[in-house]
Amino acid sequence: MEIRYLGHSCFELTEGETRILIDPFLSDNPKAAASAEEVEPTHIFLTHGHFDHWGDTPAIAERTGAHCVAITELGWELQGLGLENVVDPNLGGTAEFDGGWVRLVPAWHTSTTPSGTANTPTGLVIGLGGKVVYHLGDTALFSDLQLVPRRNEVDVAIVPIGGHYTMDRFDAATACELVSARTVIPCHYDTFPPIETDAEAFRSDVESRTSSRVVVMAPGDTHSE
């Protein structure tokens, strides 16, 4: 499986013919490594509806026909925009697709879409190519993060570290202790001044306290699992 970081919280997971785009905030992202016109996903998964995660979802999905998975209210909004390939599970729900699955789990945050639709933020637990990727979304630190690996051992955890709008790098290091992933990739930092932080210090903290390996990626980088 290839994991490409496109900036902020946007990642592309590729395995065979499956290309999953998570939180495609590209057009207005000053650190984006690709444009909305360049990506060709087969699937789009959303953690929540804030503008920096909802991003270019409607335009990309309309152009590519990508299958979208998002919590119920976001799914309804996407369907209301005329998109047909939409699956709308709620928290705890799992959507299956050729080659994998995605389960929505809690994340402590807030969210409305750019058009005002209120929705509950989620984390995404994704099974693809025999690996499990857990994108924590824009969460604060909370103890139930430790429940995810009780069901599925996590190969890769994608963890927000920027603070201000999410947990900071200190709480994120504690979150890594709870999730116990083999590999940790930090996200949601340095895009804007309020979320600037030291990713290398985060790496040092996590690797000194856990058995996880931290992979710090620049926008455009690809990591193979």
Image (tube, rainbow, N blue to C red):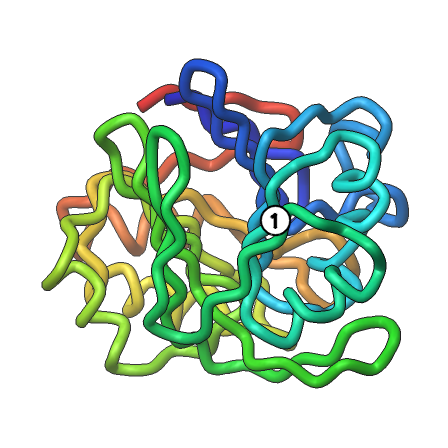
Image quarter of residue 111: bottom right
> In what element is the residue under mark 1?
strand
Query: In x, y percent, where is residue 189?
Result: 62, 55
Query: In x, y percent, where is residue 134?
Result: 35, 52
- In the displayed structure, would residue 39 be above or below residue 55? above
Q: Residue at x 28, y 53 (%)?
A: 206
- In the displayed structure, would residue 205 be above or below residue 215? below
Determine the residue located farthest toward the top in the rendered image: 16
Query: In x, y percent, where is residue 15?
Result: 41, 20
Tell me the kind of residue under disc 1: Cys
- Image quadrant holding the C terminus, namely top left
**In the shown orientation, is residue 83 left or right of residue 161?**
right
Determine the residue located farthest toward the left in the rendered image: 150
Q: Residue at x 55, y 54 (%)?
A: 69
**In the shown orientation, is residue 208 left or right of residue 111?**
left
Crowding at mark 1 (Cα within 10 Å: few <14, some 14-19, many 20+): many
- Image quadrant holding the N terminus, namely top left
- In the displayed structure, would residue 6 be above or below residue 151? above
- In the displayed structure, would residue 206 be above or below residue 194? above
For label 1, the residue is 68
**In the shown orientation, is residue 83 left or right of residue 166?**
right
